[in-house]
Image (cartoon, rainbow, N blue to C red):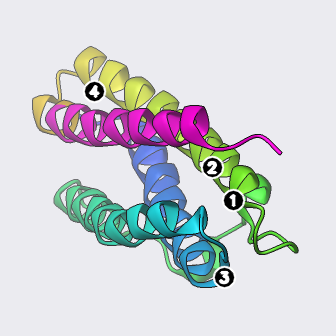
Amino acid sequence: MTTDEITDLLTEAYLDELETVMNYLSNAIVLDGIHAEEVKASLEADIQEELDHARMIGERLKQLDESPPGSESFDAQQSNLQPPADTTDVQSVIDGVLEAEEDAIETYRSLAAAADDANDPVTEDVAVTLLADEEAHRTEFRGFQKEFPMD
């Protein structure tokens, strides 16, 4: 039996994934400089993965007789992932990605726990799958953070 908590978390995650796609795309376009290339390539690769996450979540909402929300339900939350005014400020983008990944990890852990409590193994499986992907993204960007030259 699904709960309002599960559908609320799925809806939150869906909107977060779409916001992440928007911000990753913007940052992948605007970043400049020699140190930006590897981060830009990673963001480009992650865009499709985050979009796939949103699709998976939207399909799960549909299976639970809910609709994924449209743009009128959207309130931007990722202030730290906005494209920097200084397009060579790669560090701020790395920090913003890490914050977004931490938020996603927290959401998917909460979703997995709520799904377990509600005896909803399908949603729990979705949450665990997405959690693994987000933890991998976090690890990659922690590596960028360690390697990035501190000016």
| Residue highlighted by disc 2 | 94
Label located before the other in sequence (3 or 2): 3
Question: Horizontal and vertical percent for residue 125?
Answer: 15, 34
On residue 80, the disc is none
Find the distance from the CA under tag 1 to the CA under tag 3.
10 Å
Examine the image and state in which quarter residue 23 appears: bottom right
Helix, strand or loop at mark 2: helix
The quarter of the displayed image where residue 79 is located: bottom right
Which residue is under mark 4? 115
Main SS, magenta region, reads: helix
Question: Mark 3 belongs to which amino acid?
Answer: Val
Asked if disc 2 and disc 1 are in contact, CB closer than 8 Å, the reply is yes
- Looking at the image, which residue sits at the far right? 85
- Picture layout, residue 64 above or below residue 46: above
Frontmost residue, 43 versus 51? 43
Span highlighted in magenta in the image: 125-151
How far apart are the alpha carbons under marks 4 and 3? 39 Å
- Quadrant containing the N terminus is top left
Q: Nearer the viewer, mark 4 or mark 3?
A: 3
- Marks 3 and 2: CB-CB under 8 Å? no
Q: Amino acid at mark 2?
A: Ile
Q: What residue appears at the point 76 percent right and 69 percent down from the top-left corner?
A: 88
> For the residues carrying marks 4 and 1, which lies nearer the camera in this image?
1
- The residue at 21%/64% (across/down) is 59
Residues under labels 3 and 2: Cα distance?
14 Å
Name the residue type under label 4: Ala
- Distance (Cα) linking label 4 and label 1: 37 Å
**SS at circle 1:** helix
Of callouts 1 and 3, which one flags the residue occurring earlier in the amino acid sequence?
3
